[in-house]
Amino acid sequence: MDDFKLPTLMAQRLVDGLMGGYKEYLAERKQKQQALTISGAFAWTRSNFIDSKISQLFSQDDTVDSQIDKAGYAWEYLQFIQESDSDRALIIVKNARQVKRNFNGATASIDKNNYLYRLAGINNTWSAAGLLSGKPTDRVVQLELALPEATTDFEHLAEQVSSNFSKFYIVTYEVDNVSKMISDIELTMPNQSKMTLSPIQNLTPLISRSQFQINSEELETIQGDQVPDAAYEQNTLFGYEINTDAENEREAGAE
């Protein structure tokens, strides 16, 4: 998988953006708690802070650009585009629990209108060559209400991504349920035919080298959050998830 790994500096910037964006998000949550009687809705802004910080750190890098896209009807996120002489890669950053619930090995229940499924098609050349392998994760059947505007966006996206990019990466991160600290960051490539994630590069060691460090006092702001971590990153306002594994149900309850 070495051929698919990102350059060291780029990998560190992605981690710095994750840590720096999360740090700014925590500061904003604290400020809103002090200023407003009720501020729980700001929990859903975390990914905006992370994407924005990554974009800021890459603003001086001529090989990386960013663009806003939509996942479904209203959820905006940033796509990062890495250019080289022979390669054009698309990179997005997502909560690990959410992504693994889409790429869970359950090919029989694929929602082909899901934007992650569409984007995963970029990697079909590598999958067909047997270069991407992965293990299915939590088996979850995800049901979404289709909206006309979302369908149009998906069709437009499908027409462009297949020809414009040669690789599609998802940088996944996990937030520890107890400490609320970012505990794991990994570079992955989705396999569309198997609906699995192929691990490419473990970025977790780069957390300790980041210019942005988070202390326990900063994390106190969100210690009382009761919503499962991945729920803060849903890509549709109309999503429902059904766990088919009893163990997953217990795990979801623990979150």
Image: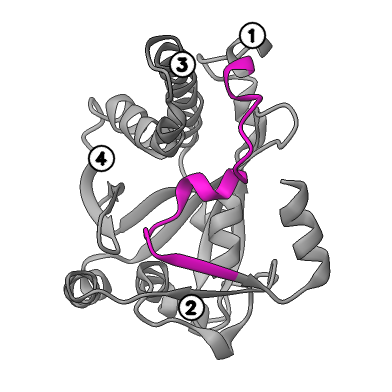
Q: Mark 2 points at which residue?
A: 192
Say what secondary structure mark 2 lies in.
loop
- Please say if the residues under marks 4 and 1 sit with CB atoms less than 8 Å apart: no
CA–CA distance between discs 4 and 2? Answer: 27 Å
Question: Residue 59: which quarter of the image?
Answer: top left
Judging depth in this view, the residue of 228 and 186 nearest the camera is: 228
Q: Which of marks 1 and 3 is in front?
A: 3
- Residue at the spot x=59%, y=43% of the render? 227
Quick check: can you spot residue 127? yes
Q: Name the residue under label 1.
A: 217
Q: Which mark is residue 33?
A: 3
119 with respect to 223 (left or right) = left
CA–CA distance between discs 2 and 1? Answer: 41 Å
Question: Residue 62: which quarter of the image?
Answer: top left
Q: What residue type is labelled 4?
A: Thr
Q: Return the x and y of residue 57 as percentages of the image width and height.
A: 33, 25
Which is nearer the N-term, disc 4 or disc 2? 4
Q: How is the image coloured?
A: one colour
